[in-house]
Image: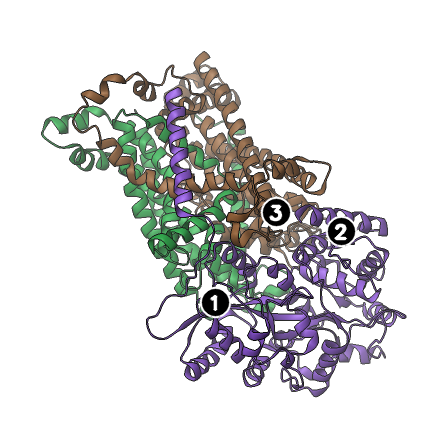
Amino acid sequence: MKGRGPHSAAPPLPLFQSSEERWVFAVSASTTTSKSAGASAKAPRGGTRKNRRPGWWLPYALLAPAVVFELVIHVIPMVTGIWMSFLKLTKMFISNWGNAPFIGFKNYAVALDFNAAVGSGLLKSFLITCAFTILVVAISWGLGMAAAVALQRKFFGRGFFRTLFLVPYALPMYAGIIAWKFMLQKDNGALNHILYDNLGLPGDKPFWLIGDNAFAAVVIVAIWRLWPFAFLMLMAGLQSIPNDVYEASAVDGARPLRQWSAITLPMLRPVNMVLLLVMFLWTFNDFNTPFVLFGGSQPPAGDLISFHIYNASFLTWNFGSGAAMSVLLLLFLLVVSGIYLIIMNRRSHRA
Amino acid sequence: MTVKIRTFAAAAAIAALAITATGCSGGNNNSPADGGGKTLTYWASNQGTSLDNDKEVLTPVLQKFQDETGVKVNLEVIGWNDLQTRIQTAVTSGQAPDVLNIGNTWAASLQSTGAFLPFDSAAFDAIGGKDKFVKTAMDTGGVPGQDPTSVPLYGLAYGLYYNKAMFKDAGLTPPTTWEEMAADAKALTKDGKYGFSLAAGSYTENSHFAFINAAQNGADFFDADGKPTFTSDGIVDGIARYLDLMQTDKAVNPSNAQYDNGTQAINDFANGKAAMILSQNNADSSIASQGMKNDEYGVVAFPAPEGGKPIATMVAGINMSIFKNTKNKDAALEFVKFMTSEATQATLDKSFAALPVLDGVTPSFTDNAEEAKTFSDIYSNKSKPLPLVAAEDQFESTVGKAMNQMFATIASGGTVSKADIKSALTTAQQAVEAAS
Amino acid sequence: MRETNPAKVFRIVVVTFLTIFTVIPVYVMVISGLKPLKDVQGAFSWWPSTLTVQPYIDMWQTVPLASYFVNSAIVATVATVLSLIIAIFASYAISRYQFRGRSLFSTTVLSTQMLPGVLFLLPLFLIFVNINTNFGIQLVGTRTGLIITYLTFSLPFSIWMLAGYFDGIPRELDEAAKVDGCGPMRALLTVILPAARPGLVAVAIYSFMTSWGEVLFASVMTTDANRTLAVGLQLYSTQTNVYWNQIMAASVVVSIPIVIGFLLLQKNFVAGLTAGAVK
């Protein structure tokens, strides 16, 4: 969504290690271990007002610009969006929406009535998005890990491949997707040309952008864009594992696969924890891939939820209903992320 | 924890305050106040071969308007991908141009927003009277019985384009009934060529032909009260007939199921890959740009089945609307008058291959007199406006998208029965009802 | 330690597969930009019937690509610079100070990462309109509007990244600077920023890419005058023709600066990653 998806530059590893605590703390609201955040809670409260240290205002001044922009661009629009979800905001009211009637949870009721057209459409889209997200995140992570491990050892041309693999990530996202759209055409597309004309697969050339194959298409394109991000993060993570750990285990006779599961994976845990969550959020909210790939006529098999909501708002002019769906999506993401972080947090405490 | 909640509550309160303070109903206009001379903002839809091409065509016309009236027009040409979203955000926010183009099929939907200036009799007087327009064109201005909120600018109509050489080689004459057309299409499907090319992946085109085929069967998508009646037999049969060009007649390349705009079908036609296409009259410039000459193809009305109603097209085209909150109402009306004047129309019709929307004017979009006559006849005598109801846009998106799916199913080897069509239409109807 | 045979096979298989997966779309993009229109409308071929640079010439005519390019460059650059400055201040506060509301700020900022863009597209547009009404600042249809939108999009992640980076810089360094008589701002400027250079580069690249690639908001917030490449590229499919060869040529052109920039700074990047890891 909003193009900040996998286009984020790689957040450096150590920063994840430290800031992860902050986030875990923030979401789980536990005041236990986090040294950085815990301190603020322990800061004397009553006393501060009387004998404030000189310069107490400095952190606030430093934060002020960020707060202003966050308020204007993120927070206020979000609150407005939530408010909209309680209005009957169809085209009859859109031009003067101060007058739109307040209808309570009706938009939510319609969105969640899975027996009727609107609700069942949303549910289908949600399930498709879940399948999409699981596949894209799992495979991207797998490819990223495979590539990071394969390029861990020095060999001739390593630098070249490392650079090459980052190209899909560096491309502006719409340029990459448009190229895929061009390749996925039935008769004139490169993909069918490769599979059927060059590799000689039997049968007729299938469609990729319509019908059920559209799901495979959108998954492949999303993986193409996302896996280099996993690669970049994991590569950075691997470089922080000292070489002698491997050497010690090699002396013990550990095989590569065993080394990977016994050393690499546990050492990468802090990276993975954040990486998976970030990839999950981006993928679940992915708007650009279906938007650019399918244009105005997306097939049901590629009906990802962000795009579904966009259509529900803009195509039918029912912005109240679209806002309600967005809020439901937001709640879902909050709950999933919260549970994920709590579980991860517990495990790391136990470990 | 409590501290956090309190802080959050405070933040929320501030946010809420900010909203109230700034007010949330639109209602201003962004035409920059240019001191002395008046200025209008005009959003034009993309009609020519590119946005730049539109600009080149319109700029001298707008200059002429400025010379005549002293009103400067700031032009923005908007692509079809963006136009609907841009209009919506403009309607929502009130931050809008003074005058804009709309697809005439949206007229009733946009009218229901109440954001556009109704043309009452005074307004009509200001632009030269309601009667100067072709009646069928004027019918698309809005919901019947209310003052329309748009007036016709460019007229368009569907025609059946056929490749003369391919017909001649097969010993065929242009069809006059649906049955003949289907038989011709089958006969012409050979040697890797197809009888027909359809934009079967475009929901707008699909919804248009759902409408036209249903209209030939005498069926309507909305009843007199504006309630959707998508599942009537006439509609199901009409859609089935259209689908059968691909499904049973196999006269359409299954690949067409992913043609998401008319251009691709036109290219097939111009490159000799298909013998017939259904297209609006502005296809001529695209066909020419692909190297097919005007005398290599002919146009007839899209035929109805025997015993059906002779409806060959919906009344297609572009209308002009004025935003209600314009600060320059008089200048805006003056501008609409200028754009719909005979002189301007003559220039623009030729450049954009449009049919005249003015009564009694000869078409100038082509030098081919026969083609001009055919299209004029279709437009004036064999046309029916799309449903003039607020939910028209939802009809297009729900029914059109359902048909995209049906074509996709057929193209990938499945079958679509009448029962399937009916159940898809039931879902579409539910969606339209839910949104109203 | 020697590489075992299975490991070698694994490496070759992975690298081969991923190379093919990565290269094909890029190759198709590059080669299709060098084909005549007839070629791209017909069956795919690995090599053009006639190699032509015509698409690279025509594409500037079909849509005003040059002006979109300028718009994108201005918007992305300014948004990046501002976002970086704001993120530096905010991260410095978070990393070096204890104050009330600190965790509220972190939480709120981070949770905006979860916001579905459609939820606040329309409200944001309305707020911009209201700002115009009440304060006379034109934001819709101007570069300013896009700049403040984009700089905010990249802000949460940038703050998060930089704060972590600053945490990795020993406090003793800036304490020492303060003992030498530096104010907190001097300490930030002279001690922390130089030490965090790789992190700053990473954040800058991230912001730039965010702005350069955004589609949804750009399609609503831009008009002819401030249209960016992300929207401009879609204009090649006009009413009457889809110029695939020009689209591909334009895609190559819009990609080149960002790909080169990214790949050049990539070394800086990975160096930064490893350096920080020794914490």
Of the numbered discs in the image, which one, if any, rests on residue B412?
A: 2
Mark 1 — residue?
Answer: B98
Residue A228 position, x and y percent, is: 47, 40
Rendered-image quadrant of the N terminus of chain C: top left
Residue A238 in view in this figure: yes
Q: Residue at 76% of width from left, 80% of height from top?
A: B164
Name the chain under label 2: B
Name the chain under label 3: A
Residue positioned most to the top:
A350
Display colour for chain B: purple
What is the quadrant of residue B399 in the picture? bottom right
Q: Is residue C274 left or right of residue B204?
A: left
The vertical placement of A240 against B429, above or below, is above
- Provide the letter of the chain coloured brown: A
Q: Residue at 36% of width from left, 52% of height from top?
A: C134
Instruction: Determine whether label 2 and label 1 are within 8 Å by CB.
Output: no
Mark 3 — residue?
Answer: A312
The amino acid sitting under disc 3 is Ala
Display colour for chain C: green
In this view of the protein, which residue sits in the foreground, A17 or B225?
B225
